[in-house]
Image (tube, grey):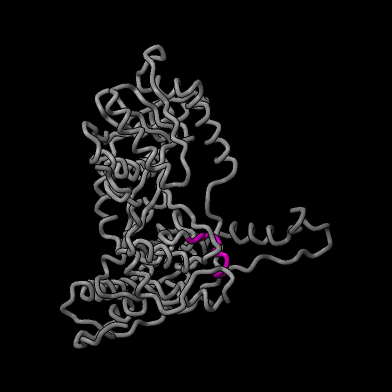
Amino acid sequence: MSESLDSGPRPQAPPRPPARTTALRQRLAELRGPAVRPRPLDARALAALAANPGCKRRALLDGAGVDKAALAAALGSPGAFGQSQFAFMRGNAFEARVKSDGGAELMRLLGVDGGAGFRVPDLAAAGPEGRAARTALALREATAAGDWTLLDHPLLALEVAGSPAYLEPDAVVVHPDGRWTVVEIKSFPMIDASADAAKVGAAARQAAVYVLALEHTAARTKGARVAHSVLLVCPKDFSNLPTASLVDVRKQLSVTRRQLARLTRIEDIAAALPEGATFELDRKPEELTAAVESVSAAYAPECLAVCELAFHCRARAREEGAVEALGRSVRGELGGLTTVTGVLAAARGACGDPADPTVAALRLATTLRTEALAAHPCRESPSETSSPSSSEGLSLIGQRDPETGAPPPPGEPGPGPLPTHSPDAAAPVPPLTPLTTDTAAPCR
């Protein structure tokens, strides 16, 4: 009996992406502009985002792939941010030197002799999703084979606040025992086996993001484990010869994992935006400013080194008198006092609960300051009023030619001596408002 054409299993259609993910991608494309290509989220941006998880503005802009440098210029607050071309070219040249001879120099730093042999798989694929899938496959094959394997610029996938991010470390080495090691190549020197602590810390935070992404892939690979010590490769002393050192990133990894878990989901932030809010650069400045200000930010002075919008956020924080502009440590010490005006008012006794330890400490500091100024009023030191040589020196300086520095010719008056400070002209210190401790009005 012959079988009909309809009998037998039907071929399965390729799985479609979930409707929730598709809707989120469409919404993020609308925010940055349908014709604008998304800016990829790298490990350096993720490390900065993990250091400030309360900033919803950066989380949304990075998730949508908005060019923050161009956005800051459109808002009127551009900043000199980014890596210099000289440092960029030097870093590329040093990385090429490390990976020369097919990666033999890099493997030598790990103690692998060139004669032992190692594999360098091809990771080329179409699109970031294809490259990430090809990298995951190469990691599984290398772990199962049990050979030394060097992955040059693999692409790793990591979900951040509900949105996928693709990360590209310099290299990943697979050991025969199934261990995966992240390789971070930097161009700052390692002098006498030690490097700048701040730069090493920044490299460790960046490498911790790669380790976190690798752990997600290793959890689905039998016999694989990710090393918590990354290989940092730097120039040796003042030469261009590479040297390497293992850096333990367990502390940075735990902090990054905890901070990224605290990030609000991007879809929740986007849902709270007003209708019609987008970050397209061709919009009117006032409309673009309103769209940016509709997302809350968590500014801190540390943002100036890692975020392109830091100058804009700092200007807004200063206009509002927010204590965040003074630093996170100051903000933490002031408790419920959120503005500089409120802090000064609480210190004078114009508002605040006297039982609040922060308000009590501010009023005590004001009292001590008032007593110190009353006991020792400001006046000139005797050395400044009794030394004629100082006034004569100022007079001679004031009579010299401002361009050549030569004294005036005989018989011609100079421009005159520089103005000197007179004790009689000193302005008196204004008295402070008397403290009142019987008020509990809120500070604004």
Quadrant where the C terminus sits is bottom left
Can residue 117 be seen here? Answer: yes
Viewer-closest of 266 and 346: 266
Q: Tell me the residue at 49%/55% (across/down).
A: 39
Q: Tell me the residue at 27%/70% (across/down).
A: 334
Q: Position of residue 19 (x, y in %)?
A: 34, 64
Label count reads 0
Residue situated furthest left in the rendering = 355
Viewer-closest of 67 and 20: 20
Viewer-closest of 177 and 262: 177
Q: Position of residue 240 (x, y in %)?
A: 52, 26
Q: Position of residue 36 (x, y in %)?
A: 54, 61
Segment tinted magenta in the rendering: 66-76
Considering only vertical position in the picture, is 174 above or below 289?
above
Considering only vertical position in the picture, is 30 above or below 6?
below
Viewer-closest of 156 and 338: 156
* Residue 73 highlighted magenta (yes or no): yes
Can residue 197 be seen here? Answer: no
Residue situated furthest top in the rendering = 115
* Residue 233 highlighted magenta (yes or no): no
Magenta stretch, overall SS: helix
Q: Tell me the residue at 48%/63% (across/down).
A: 309
Q: Quarter-wise, where is residue 435 in the image?
A: bottom left
Considering only vertical position in the picture, is 363 above or below 208?
below
Quadrant where the N terminus sits is top left
Q: Tell me the residue at 46%/62% (across/down).
A: 310
Horizontal relation, residue 200 to residue 8: left or right: right
Horizontal relation, residue 399 to residue 84: left or right: right
